Structures are given as structure tokens and as C-alpha cells.
Image (spheres, grey):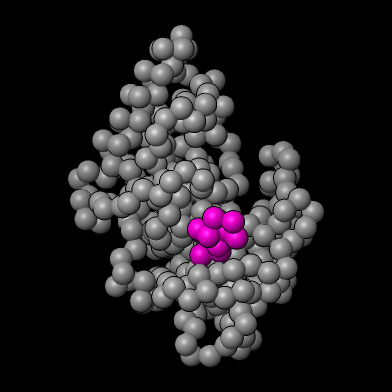
């Protein structure tokens, strides 16, 4: 299966209000298992250490980051592909905290990430897809977490994880997914096409990066987008494999927390499928930040 770097897919489509999710109605959400982070949770760790990287044109989250402490200094940790544009790195980025405060942060350090052109390039870039930005103010008023200090090395053990971020795909009920598939099949019939791999159907899901699917979306009133903070409770192994973690464009650079609310990795890859066993699946292994 192809792996894709998480981008802000459909970020320009209007915001859709949220209501329901697996945490409030589990029987209706057996495929998309993410939950919206509540207002109460946003005031607590680890969620209050998660920040939005703000698009300077549309003033909405384009990626996600985490405030961590490194050598007594508070910084934002995120993905390099969120701040690399061609051959240039952003010297400054705006972040938004959960309490609404915004800061302009400055580039500290980042991996040798280069915008990939092929799948091979993506694999080479994977270890380099990280970036650190300095926060202009320090002190107890800024919530932060730290890198994990646990030793997660047992390859045969599954450890609890929570992925948090601004994935732009709304949390879809089973009925939402079924309706989307039905509408797409009808669209293909009207255009004398069939549902197969060439038209984006694979592993019982719809590939949202498929050219035919994207053409279909451009002709619709899209109700897929939601830029609220979301969480995905999942697991990982000592090999760095993620299990049942769900993300979408906008999750990039967001934290993967351990069961002590400390960060052990960041989101860099995802599979943009709607429906099926790979719905919104996080792709690739994570780098354990120990």
C-alpha cells in the first residue's frame, strides 16, 4: 500500500461544525474511531501542550505541534514537511495554544528534509522529518510536556498511545462513510466508469488522492472537513509500529503520547482512505524519541 506524507488535504473547504463521535456514540462509529477533544480536556495534559501551526493566509490550522522542554527551554516540536517549502525553511511560524494565545516562534533546528518527489524520496526523508522552533516567552504560564523516559523496546508488546492533532477530516459515522461510497458509485455510473483501483477503490476504501475521486469532490458540496482538535487512542510496539492510529491532513507534526502523557514520536505519514480497514490510517513506523 502506498504511504503519503500528511498534507492539509481539503483545507480550503469551509468549516463544518462537529457534534458526534465514537466517545459519545460508539455503536455509530465503528470505522472512524477518533474522538473530538473536549473543552475540559483541552485545559489538561497532554492536550494543552498540543498547538496548532497557523496558516498565515486563512488563519486556520495547517499542521500540529507540541510544546516540550529541552534543556530547560520550551520549544515547539513538529514535522519538517510542515515548514519546508521547496528548498526553503520557514524562519518563523505562528502557533496557537488551546487557550487561544498565539505566538510567533523562530526556527531552532530541523532535519535535512527535502520535499520528496518519489516514494523512495519519502522513505529517505522519514528520519529527517522533524523541526524545532523557539517560543518567545518562557515560564510556568506555558503548558509543556517532555520526551518519554520509558523504555519501549519489547517488540512483542503493545503499548498504549494517544495521537492528537488537527486532522482536517471530520469524524465520520458508519452511515457517513456508506453515504459517501454510494454517492461516488452513482457518480461513476453517470460517467460510465466502474469502481476499481483505477478509480480509487482499494482495500474496501476510497483513496481521496485518486484523480477521479478528487474530480468528484470538486463537483460536490463538501461536508467532510472539520478542523477541531481530535484524538485517536491506539497502540504501538517496540518496533515502532503503530496499531489502529487514525490521522488526516493537519495531523502532521502532531504528538504521539505514551501512557504518561509524554511524547514518543510525531505524525509524518498517513493513508488518505475513507472507509475500509485502512480508514484514515497512520502510515509508516514512528521514531521513538528517547
Q: Assign the C terminus to one quadrant of the image.
A: bottom right
Q: Is residue 178 magenta?
A: no
Range of the magenta residues? 52-62
Identity of the residue furthest to the top in this view = 192
Q: Position of residue 163 (x, y in %)?
A: 44, 60
In the rendered structure, the answer to whether residue 269 lies left or right of residue 90 reads left
Residue at x-position 57% and y-position 48%: 7
Q: Assign the N terminus to one quadrant of the image.
A: top right
Residue at x-position 53% and y-position 90%: 139
Residue at x-position 59% and y-position 86%: 137
Q: Position of residue 87 (x, y in %)?
A: 79, 54
For residue 155, say whether it is visible.
no
Q: Looking at the picture, tell me which residue is in the foreground, 226 or 255.
A: 226
User: For residue 277, what is the image quadrant?
Assistant: top left
Q: Vertically, is 140 above or below 237?
A: below
Identity of the residue furthest to the right in this view = 87
Q: Looking at the picture, tell me which residue is in the foreground, 237 or 257.
A: 257
Residue at x-position 59% and y-position 68%: 94
Amino acid at each position: 500500500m502506498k504511504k503519503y506524507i500528511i498534507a492539509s488535504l481539503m483545507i480550503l473547504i469551509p468549516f463544518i461544525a462537529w457534534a458526534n463521535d465514537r466517545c459519545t456514540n460508539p455503536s455509530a462509529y465503528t470505522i472512524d474511531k477518533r474522538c473530538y477533544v473536549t473543552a475540559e480536556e483541552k485545559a489538561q495534559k497532554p492536550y494543552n501542550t498540543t498547538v496548532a501551526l497557523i496558516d498565515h493566509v486563512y488563519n486556520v490550522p495547517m499542521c500540529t505541534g507540541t510544546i516540550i522542554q529541552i534543556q530547560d527551554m520550551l520549544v515547539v516540536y513538529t514535522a519538517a514537511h510542515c515548514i519546508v517549502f521547496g528548498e526553503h525553511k520557514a524562519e518563523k511560524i505562528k502557533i496557537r495554544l488551546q487557550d487561544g494565545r498565539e505566538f510567533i516562534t523562530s526556527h531552532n533546528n530541523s532535519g535535512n528534509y527535502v520535499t520528496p518527489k518519489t516514494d523512495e524520496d519519502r522513505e529517505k526523508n522519514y528520519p529527517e522529518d522533524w523541526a524545532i522552533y523557539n517560543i518567545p516567552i518562557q515560564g510556568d504560564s506555558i503548558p509543556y510536556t517532555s520526551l518519554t523516559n520509558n523504555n519501549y523496546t519489547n517488540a512483542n508488546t503493545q503499548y498504549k498511545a494517544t495521537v492528537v492533532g488537527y486532522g482536517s477530516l471530520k469524524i465520520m459515522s458508519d452511515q457517513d462513510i456508506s453515504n459517501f461510497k454510494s454517492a461516488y458509485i452513482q457518480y461513476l455510473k453517470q460517467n460510465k466508469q466502474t469502481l476499481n483501483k483505477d478509480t480509487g477503490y482499494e482495500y474496501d476504501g476510497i483513496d481521496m488522492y485518486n484523480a477521479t475521486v478528487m474530480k468528484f469532490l470538486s463537483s460536490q458540496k463538501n461536508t467532510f472537513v472539520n478542523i477541531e482538535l481530535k484524538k485517536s487512542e491506539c497502540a504501538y510496539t517496540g518496533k515502532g509500529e503503530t496499531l489502529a492510529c487514525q490521522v488526516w491532513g493537519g495531523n502532521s507534526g502532531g504528538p504521539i503520547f505514551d501512557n504518561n502523557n509524554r511524547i514518543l514520536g510525531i505524525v509524518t505519514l498517513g493513508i488518505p482512505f475513507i472507509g475500509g480497514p485502512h480508514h484514515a490510517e497512520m502510515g509508516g513506523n514512528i521514531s521513538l524519541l528517547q
